[in-house]
Amino acid sequence: MIRRPLLLAAFLLATAAGAAFGASDPTVDVYGEIENHALQPRYEHITQNLRCLVCQNESIADSNVELASDLRRQVREMLIAGKSDDDIFQYMTDRYGEFVRFNPPLTPKTWLIWGAPFIMVAVGAVVIIRVARHRARLPVDDEPASEIK
Amino acid sequence: MWKFLIPVAVFIALAVLFALGLNPKRDIHALPSPLIGKPAPAFDLTDVMDPSRHVDNTALKGQIYVLNVWGTWCFECRAEHEELLAIARQHVVPLIGLDYMDQREKAQQWLTQLGNPYQAVGFDTDGRTAINWGVYGAPETYLVDGRGQILYKFISPITPEVWEHEFLPRISAAQRSGS
């Protein structure tokens, strides 16, 4: 029972904060969501895949710094202007470099990053085959199984 | 024989990697700008000191200039300010300021109290021009040549050494090539 006024106060506060935020930025509604709800999933996908350049291990969707909110505004405006996801990623890459993308595209420059897991597996396979072949050539003269008993 | 060379090769490769990675002069947060060698993004902003004046970088075409990104909220910009004043006194190239995510009154107060090294200061309060230039903090300093191309970007406060060894040689090379 005592909690109710608190909850109400919190709700009012959040709404007021949302209204204040919305008022300063016409591309979001009072809840801080993009006005055109059909764009919301794309907006979330893009902002989660762009790196915040200030706190470099966070996405701009997660970060609270001003640059991240400026970049989110940029993404919203470009979405509303009808730009494609690729256009927006390209826009950011042109200005901040490949580093801004958490999911860099496969290009000659990034093939090593994408190929590294496969190269590791291949190297491991070569090592295992060599060791196995070497062991196969060893004479089977000692029987460790008999020692266990 | 080659079996002994593999560990040696691996060791050398790791040693080179660590030497590059642990170099104390390397700032791991400084990112190379993809805009080097590209046309400088155009901007047309109001001047911090006089809102009726425009700061338009397309009007600077034909001359080499330095664009310095700063803000009164930026602690390191204060450390850099003394050097900017010294650079302005040399009259080598015009210094253009970009006041980033700031309040006009605070910025005016800063320039009045500390001295104004800039020929003009664009007021980029919402950071849109900064995004176009790939700015992700302050201070950041760009060198633009006469063709309007970005020649160089330096992140963190400019020191006399940086000015002398990174900026001046590039400026005189650009002057020699006539751009």
Image: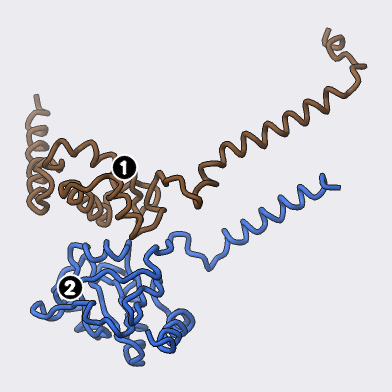
Chain colours: A brown, B blue
Q: Is residue A51 above or below residue B128?
A: above
Task: Residue at 10% x, 43% y: name it.
Answer: A29
Label 1–label 2 contact, CB within 8 A? no
**Amino acid type of the residue tagged 1 in the rendering:** Gln
Q: Which residue is pictured at 12% across the width and 48% down the height?
A: A27
The residue lying at 30 percent from left, 71 percent from top is B40
Element type at mark 2: strand
Taking depth in this image into account, of A133 and A49 the one nearest to the observer is A133
Classify residue B60 by image quadrant: bottom left
Q: Amino acid at mark 2?
A: Asp
Residue A43: image x %, image y %?
A: 23, 42
Q: Position of residue A130 (x, y in %)?
A: 77, 31
Labels 1 and 2 within one chain: no
Q: How many marks?
A: 2
**In the displayed structure, would residue B131 be above or below residue A141?**
below
- Chain letter for mark 1: A
Question: Label 2: which residue?
Answer: B44
Q: CA distance from mark 1 to mark 2?
A: 31 Å
| Quadrant where the image shows the C terminus of chain A | top right
Relative to B134, say whether A39 is above or below. Answer: above
Which residue is found at the position 15% from the left and 41% from the top? A33
Say which of marks 1 and 2 sits in front: 2
Q: Is residue B12 left or right of residue A75?
A: right
Instruction: Tell me the residue that label 1 is attached to.
Output: A48
Residue B72, numbered label: none
B4 sits to left or right of A32 = right
Measured as percent of width and height from the top left, residue A74 is found at: 22, 53
B48 sits left or right of B82 in the view: left
Within-10-Å neighbours for mark 1: few <14, some 14–19, many 20+: some
- Mark 2, Cα crowd under 10 Å, few <14 / some 14-19 / many 20+, is some
Chain of the residue where label 2 is placed in the rendered structure: B
